[in-house]
Image (spheres, coloured by chain):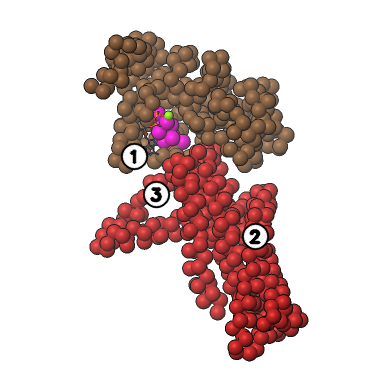
């Protein structure tokens, strides 16, 4: 693996020697990262038929993702929904139609903030844990041991996690949407300069939104979640060195995940329009 | 060990495999670690590799299992290139890592059972039999439920050996298997290595500083110094080595009037 990854970088670097080093190096590293993620994805995909007999691992990962992420998604989404209602209510005091607050909160949560919040918290709670675990397995030669046992790490360590995140992202996102909507409804009712009844708040939502908006958000969430887990697995498995590098890998995994979410967000949003 | 277990194990490892290292060189970032090493290990042989620490013994073993890619030359295991990942599917090889490389999140039992479970070698009951037998050979029955963090260094090493035994390998590689063990346990390990050869015709490459082990069970001993193979021959050669560096390595004289660290400092 070591030899494989170092070679393309040298090649690309020699092609781009005319450009300044400060620009080339990060660019090469991004391309390298994308390349090795895709390689890991292909490798994991080859083992999809083994998924039924890895059912135990899949359930364990689903549980870890749900257990660590659901509560915090709930808390954060509640306040995001509340703030959305508050801000739009504040804006509406000057322009008029307050009943559209329900629609505004509803659409923002379903199409944008639900999936993004779920993915960001996934990166922080689950992505970091995955990177730490796999980096530690790599540094302490457990990954080497798996390879000598002819047990591909992509099969045992990556595939169940990718499958689990696909199963859990819709759950996290729907949870986020619902809690956000209710947070907005409560704020809309009890804030003195808004005071809209929940009935009319939800009526505008029902009238101008359909399931397509929620589905749009779910598709985004799947893309983000899958990307986050793939990136975190890849960074963990490519850790080299000692215990200090485990920490460095965790940081890199979380930062890369956050950037990835926002970059993907733009492109997926555009593609779904 | 009962008869049926012996029969099934020998059926699986019927053909012993040989290893041939051909002009193997390896550098890390331009720093040479192995330099043009050539040697063959015959099927069913116990080959002991000795040498000062840092001489490249562990790196050599990693080339045999395909965890490192050669900078030059190649390693063939049973005629297949070791750097090809498919070779691990063709030849059952086990490496006992110097630091154990146990799966820290699993119990000792699950560490041993992982290989047969993943490769679907029998029912859970059959696997249990195999795992417990392997633990017994290394006096580890009571450790089955523990996780690696609860074990002493010597126990971890024995678990690593037990885990390799469960794989019923055709080729066993040991990286300093006795370095953290007491003399009795070290002798046990030597006996295990020799028994595997007698009963199952397993080929073994043992990296060790243990002279008793080398003299007791080795067919041949190679000595690696500074990445070169400086001596290769039957263990009897160790008693009167021709090369003065080898002699000093095997029988270092403790000279308080002229200590080595002063000589090095110049
Ligand atoms: N992955 C690596 N990267 C860089 N240098 C390494 C690596 N692995 C081993 N080395 C170097 O190779 C030399 C031999 O190491 P090793 O084979 O572990 O020695 P030993 O004979 O004690 O087992 C040492 O100088 C070590 O620093
Ligand atoms: Mg070593």
| Residue receiving disc 2 | A72
Give the magenta range.
Answer: B57-65
Count the marks. 3
- Is B250 above or below relative to B227? above
Picture quarter with the C terminus of chain B: top left
Q: Residue furthest left?
A: B266
Residue B104 on image: x %, y %: 58, 38
Would residue A145 be visible to someone looking at this image?
yes
Judging by colour alone, the chain drawn in brown in this rendered image is B
Question: How far is disc 1 from disc 3 in space, using C-alphas?
Answer: 14 Å
Quarter of the rendering containing residue B226: top left
Chain to which mark 2 belongs: A
Chain to which mark 1 belongs: B
Quarter of the rendering containing residue B237: top left
Picture quarter with the N terminus of chain B: top right
Disc 2 and disc 1 on one polypeptide chain: no
Residue name at image x 53 percent, y 20 percent: B181
Residue name at image x 62 percent, y 85 percent: A92
């Amino acid at each position: 693996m070591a030899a494989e990854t170092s070679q393309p970088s040298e090649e690309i670097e020699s092609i781009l020697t005319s450009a300044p080093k400060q620009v080339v190096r990060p660019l090469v590293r991004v391309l390298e990262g994308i390349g090795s993620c895709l390689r890991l994805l292909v490798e994991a995909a080859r083992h999809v038929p083994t998924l039924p007999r890895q059912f135990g691992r899949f359930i364990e990962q689903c549980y870890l993702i749900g257990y660590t992420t659901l509560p915090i998604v709930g808390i954060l989404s509640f306040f995001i929904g509340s703030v959305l209602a508050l801000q739009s209510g504040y804006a509406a005091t000057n322009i008029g139609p307050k009943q559209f607050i329900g629609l505004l909160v509803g659409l923002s949560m379903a199409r944008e903030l639900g999936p993004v919040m779920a993915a960001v918290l996934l990166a922080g709670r689950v992505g970091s844990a995955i990177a730490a675990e796999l980096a530690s397995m790599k540094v302490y030669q457990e990954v080497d041991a798996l390879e000598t046992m002819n047990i591909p790490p992509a099969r045992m360590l990556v595939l169940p996690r990718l499958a689990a995140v696909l199963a859990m992202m819709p759950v996290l996102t729907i949870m986020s949407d619902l809690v956000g909507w209710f947070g907005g409804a409560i704020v809309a009712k009890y804030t003195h300069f808004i005071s809209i009844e929940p009935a009319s708040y939800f009526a505008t939502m029902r009238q101008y939104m359909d399931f397509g908006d929620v589905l749009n958000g779910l598709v985004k969430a799947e893309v983000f979640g899958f990307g986050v887990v793939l990136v975190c697995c890849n960074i963990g498995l490519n850790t080299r060195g000692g215990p200090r590098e485990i920490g460095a890998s965790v940081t890199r995994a979380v930062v890369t995940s956050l950037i990835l979410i926002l970059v993907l967000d733009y492109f997926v949003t555009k593609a779904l329009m | 060990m009962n008869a049926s277990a012996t029969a099934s194990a020998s059926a699986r490892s019927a053909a012993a495999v040989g290893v041939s290292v051909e002009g193997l060189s390896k550098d890390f970032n331009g720093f040479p670690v192995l330099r043009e090493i050539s040697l063959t290990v015959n099927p069913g042989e116990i080959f002991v590799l000795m040498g000062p620490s840092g001489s490249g013994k562990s790196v050599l073993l990693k080339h045999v299992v395909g965890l490192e890619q050669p900078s030059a030359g190649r390693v063939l295991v049973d005629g297949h290139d070791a750097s090809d990942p498919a070779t691990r599917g063709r030849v059952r090889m086990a490496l006992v890592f110097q630091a154990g490389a146990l799966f820290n999140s699993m119990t000792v039992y699950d560490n041993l059972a992982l290989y047969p479970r993943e490769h679907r070698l029998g029912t859970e009951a059959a696997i249990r039999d195999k795992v417990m037998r392997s633990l017994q050979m290394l006096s580890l029955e009571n450790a089955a439920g523990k996780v690696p963090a609860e074990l002493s260094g010597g126990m971890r090493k024995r678990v690593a050996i037990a885990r390799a035994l469960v794989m019923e390998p055709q080729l066993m590689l040991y990286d300093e298997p006795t370095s953290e063990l007491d003399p009795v346990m070290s002798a046990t390990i030597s006996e295990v290595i020799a028994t595997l050869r007698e009963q199952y015709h397993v080929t073994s490459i043992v990296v060790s500083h243990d002279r008793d082990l080398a003299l007791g069970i080795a067919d041949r001993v190679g000595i690696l110094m500074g990445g070169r193979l400086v001596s290769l021959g039957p263990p009897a050669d160790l008693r009167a080595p021709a090369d003065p560096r080898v002699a000093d390595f095997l029988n270092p004289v403790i000279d308080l009037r002229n200590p080595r660290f002063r000589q090095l400092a110049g």
